[in-house]
Amino acid sequence: MDFEEYVKVKAANISALLELKKSVLDYKHAIAQQRKKDRKDLLLGRAIHCLTFEPETFDSFYQINPYDSLRSNEAKEFEADAIKKGIALLSKKDYQATHTISETIRNHKQFKLLVNNGQAEKTILETASGLAVKGRLDYVNDDFIFDLKTTKNLESFKYDFFKYKYHVKMAWYQYLDLLDTGRKLKEVIVIAASKEAPVDVVFYKINQDILDFGALEYEELIKKLIELRELGSEYDGRSEEVIEMEAPEWMQKQLS
């Protein structure tokens, strides 16, 4: 199943579920956004993933945009033709960055040792607590689940990993893989690569305690989604009442 088909599948995914933690409106907005055209950063990320895990297919889906701008009629026709063929256009800068980052990852010792005999971009569609759920794993084999992240700063990535709830997302992928195979919990390895020169790569093995902690969060979100479904599709969480502002915990301590 390609990415476009995956997006169209109506099932709960972890990115949208995490928006439900904010509000019902944020969740519904996230679902709607999934059907829109990729933002530039997502397109670049997908190109890097493709060249890293499925290099033999890269040229069929990605191509350099020979035009500095798509404003001319000729450029617009070129883009329209590429879209019909299912080809995404990358700027010369992004095309070069894609190859530099992917080459650095593929030349890493651990990539050569661990990333083999598996499946790239594996789509998993399952049922959890009566809900249709889905996920798309970057690469998975009999022993590991791999997820590739690009970052501006490898040092700050250790903090961004938790800031952006990657521990919850990795736990979700581990759970879906277990539902899919029914075998065992596989170890999760996150490949972090810097976007800017000099490109560096770090392989992080995610401790199971961290993943178990992340699992607690997605389990609560599934319960919340079930409750939302019971309220009906029209419910959006908006309040029609005046809501009293509550003092934050730090302020309550000073006031007491």
Image: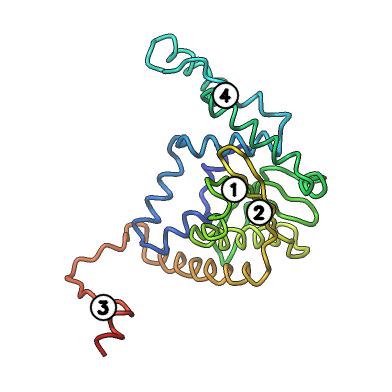
Residue topped by disc 3: 247
Q: Amino acid at mark 2?
A: Val
Residue topped by disc 2: 190
Mark 3–mark 2 Cα distance, whole angstroms, equals 38 Å
Residue located at (49% from left, 14% from top): 78
User: Which mark sits nearer the N-terminus, 3 or 1?
Assistant: 1
Residue located at (60% from left, 27% from top): 96
User: Which mark sits nearer the N-terminus, 3 or 4?
Assistant: 4
The colour scheme used here is rainbow
Give residue 245's position: percent from left, percent from top.
22, 74
Give residue 174's position: percent from left, percent from top.
66, 60
Q: Amino acid at mark 3?
A: Ala
**Mark 4 in CB contact with mark 2 (< 8 angstroms):** no
Q: Label 3 neighbourhood size at 10 Å, few (<14), some (14-19), many (20+)?
A: few
Q: Label 2 neighbourhood size at 10 Å, few (<14), some (14-19), many (20+)?
A: some
Q: Amino acid at mark 4?
A: Ile
Name the element at disc 4: loop
Mark 3–mark 4 Cα distance, whole angstroms, equals 52 Å
The part of the image, by quadrant, that contains residue 97 is: top right
**Mark 2 in CB contact with mark 1 (< 8 angstroms):** yes
Depicted 85 relative to depicted 49: above or below: above
